[in-house]
Amino acid sequence: MIFKNKNILGLSLLEALVSTAIIGIGFVAILQMTNYSVQSMHSSGERTKANFLTNIIAEDVISARDTATSSDSNFTEYLLGADDGKPIFESEACKVKDGTGSANAGKIYNTTGTDAHARKKSKWEAILDSKSYLRCRGTNETRKFQVYKICRSGCTNNNPNMQDLEMYIGRVQINLNDGKKRKYLYFQSDYKLQGVN
């Protein structure tokens, strides 16, 4: 003979609905956290790539600073050219929605340059003017590189407090996340000591 406890009645429909709603809210929160985590990893990856690309440019400039061309005394003078303070390169890749910024984009081993200096510039253009290396999340993103010449006297950026005769500062700028995250790298690309030729 089986005795039944009349106080144990089981789950009612209302209790089942409440527990289902609580579990559903938990799953929605977990899905939102997962989506946020994926976006955060993507942004972190883009910042890491931007750091790597700015370091490539700085290392290229510093490693080749003592090489000369027929018209310039060194690589920094070649980069500076006649346009002191103007960007050596400014990407237009993120300004357009489809395609890339230039026909040279993505061709980092392009041999169209006449010498090593021109090939380095075309390599930077190929990397920074392509959406393959850094993605665009809006039209306000910037990728550019320029060199400034600072001297005691006789140039655009005079500073009488300088100890060196001339100093060249390279500046790489990459704006990410539709211009909300900015990456700048300033580095001394070359210098001329006072009293030393």
Image (cartoon, rainbow, N blue to C red):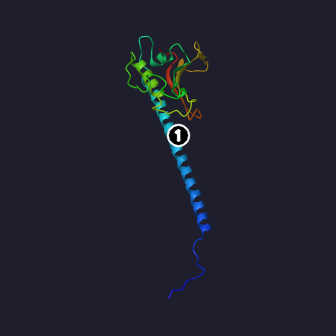
Q: Position of residue 64 (x, y in %)?
A: 42, 22
Neighbourhood count class around disc 1 (C-alpha, 10 Å): few under 14, some 14–19, many 20 upward: some
Coordinates of residue 180 in the picture (x, y in percent): 59, 35
Q: Residue at x 53, y 18 (%)?
A: 166
Foreground residue among 157 and 106: 106
Name the element at disc 1.
helix
Q: Residue furthest top?
A: 71
The amino acid sitting under disc 1 is: Ser
Compared to residue 158, the image places residue 5 above or below, namely: below
From the image, tell me which residue sits under label 1: 43
Q: Residue at x 47, y 28 (%)?
A: 130
Residue 193 percent across, percent down from the top left: 51, 19
Q: Position of residue 89 (x, y in %)?
A: 50, 22
The answer to whether residue 136 is above or below residue 36 is above
Q: Nearer the viewer, residue 163 or 49?
A: 49
Which one is in front, 36 or 175?
A: 36
Which residue is rendered at x = 57% and y = 74% of the image?
Answer: 10
Residue situated furthest bottom in the rendering: 1
